[in-house]
Image (cartoon, rainbow, N blue to C red):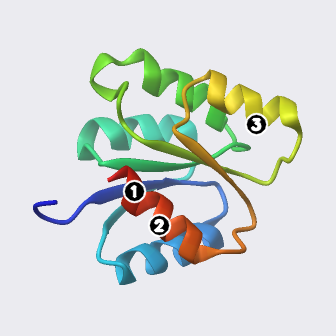
Amino acid sequence: MAGRAKILVVDDAPEFVYAIRLFLEDLGYDVVTAYNGKEAVEVLERESPDLVLLDGIMPLMDGWETLSAIRRRPSWQRLPVIMLTGLEEAQQRMESYDRGCTDLMSKPIDDYDQLALLIERML
């Protein structure tokens, strides 16, 4: 891959965003952030990231609504989106895939090596 890949991290928990940002920057990625779905769409338009890490439960526009908004835009339909959610119910997991997430990981993240491999595979 030429250049550094840019990853958008979308989560309403500032401490999680900070931690995941440090982790991703240590891996050599550029990181942009948003704290809700509405802000995420604005950042997507402005920054054109290569991959999105998207929380499910957020204010203003939750992760599933955000994912639907991403998939409605033709230029974003192939953008890799990894849903990160603390919800374990099969219904929420299926909704994530039905709306077009590329993959899903549970929060809290127990295995950062697995996340790194997943990101690397998608980029």
Name the amino acid, label 1: Arg
Q: Earlier in the sequence, mark 2 or mark 3?
A: 3
Circles 1, 2 touching at the beta carbon (< 8 Å): yes
Mark yes or no: residue 54 visible.
yes
Image quarter of residue 110: bottom right
Any mark on residue 45, and which? Answer: none
User: Disc 2 or disc 3, which is closer to the eye?
Assistant: 2
**70 on left or right of 11:** left
Q: CA distance from mark 1 to mark 3?
A: 21 Å
* Circle 3 crowding by C-alpha within 10 Å: few under 14, some 14–19, many from 20: some
Q: CA distance from mark 1 to mark 2?
A: 6 Å
Residue situated in front as seen by the camera: 59 or 120: 120
- Tell me: residue 121, above or below residue 60: below
Any mark on residue 93, and which? Answer: 3
The residue at which mark 1 appears reads as 121
Residue situated in front as seen by the camera: 15 or 75: 75
* Circle 2 crowding by C-alpha within 10 Å: few under 14, some 14–19, many from 20: few
SS for callout 2? helix
Where residue 20 appears, x then y in whole percent? Answer: 53, 72
The residue at which mark 2 appears reads as 117
Residue pictured at 25% horizontal, 43% vertical: 48
Q: Quadrant of the N terminus?
A: bottom left
- Tell me: residue 62, above or below residue 116: above
Name the amino acid, label 2: Leu
Residue pictured at 75% horizontal, 29% vertical: 94
SS for callout 3? helix
Name the amino acid, label 3: Arg
Image quarter of residue 100: top right
Where residue 69 appears, x then y in whole percent? Answer: 49, 22
Judged from this view, the residue extending furthest toward the left is 2
**110 on left or right of 100:** right
